């Protein structure tokens, strides 16, 4: 499992970040499926893996459940100002 933006590619198994971007893709190698996100405004992208811990016959096990892609914008608004952003997603 991976995420990529602007020529950088990182694993979804470890916390990571991608450069500020207007497009990010996340994929799973076995199935070949990719989720593509187009951002109306460039954002910082943080990758946060999600793990659970279970207790089985062989002891404690760490299981990878997925990952969160956090899109982050710094917003500084003056009184009465507004801010809009749209993100579209597609499965490839």
Image: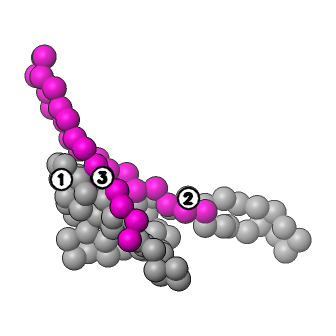
Residue 76 painted magenta: yes
Query: Which residues are the magenta region?
Result: 65-92
11, above or below 55, in the image: below
What's the CA distance linking mark 2 and mark 1? 25 Å
Residue 77 tag number: none
User: Where is residue 83 drawn, in percent x and y?
Assistant: 17, 32
Q: Are marks 2 and 1 in contact (CB under 8 Å)?
A: no
Furthest residue to the right?
A: 57
75, above or below 17, in the image: above
Q: Please indicate whether residue 53 sits to the left or right of residue 66 in the image.
A: right
Q: Please indicate whether residue 54 sits to the left or right of residue 20 in the image.
A: right
User: Where is residue 7 drawn, in percent x and y?
Assistant: 22, 76
What's the CA distance linking mark 3 and mark 2? 23 Å
Q: What crowding class fits label 1: few (fewer than 14 Cα within 10 Å), some (14-19), or many (20 or more)? A: some
User: Where is residue 6 drawn, in percent x and y?
Assistant: 20, 71
At horizontal 37% and vertical 51% (from top left) the residue drawn is 70
Find disc 2 in the rendering and name its residue: 50
Mark 3 or mark 1: name the one nearer the start of the chain: 1
At horizontal 52% and vertical 79% (from top left) the residue drawn is 31
Mark 3 or mark 2: name the one nearer the start of the chain: 2
88, above or below 8, in the image: above
Circle nearer the viewer, 3 or 2: 3
Circle nearer the viewer, 3 or 1: 3
User: Where is residue 37 drawn, in percent x and y?
Assistant: 31, 59
Find disc 3 in the rendering and name its residue: 88
Residue 17 visible somewhere in the drawing: no
Find disc 1 in the rendering and name its residue: 42
State the colouring used for the structure image: one colour
At horizontal 20% and vertical 35% (from top left) the residue drawn is 84
Q: Are marks 3 and 1 in contact (CB under 8 Å)?
A: no
Q: Nearer the viewer, residue 15 or 29?
A: 29
Q: Quadrant of residue 78?
A: top left
């Amino acid at each position: 499992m991976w995420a990529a933006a602007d020529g950088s590619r990182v694993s979804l198994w470890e916390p990571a970040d991608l450069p500020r971007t207007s497009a990010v893709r996340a994929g799973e190698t076995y199935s070949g499926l990719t989720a593509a996100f187009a951002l109306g405004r460039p954002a910082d992208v943080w990758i946060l893996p999600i793990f659970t811990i279970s207790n089985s016959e062989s002891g404690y096990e760490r299981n990878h459940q997925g990952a969160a892609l956090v899109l982050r914008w710094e917003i500084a608004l003056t009184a009465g100002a507004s801010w809009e952003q749209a993100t579209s997603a597609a499965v490839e």
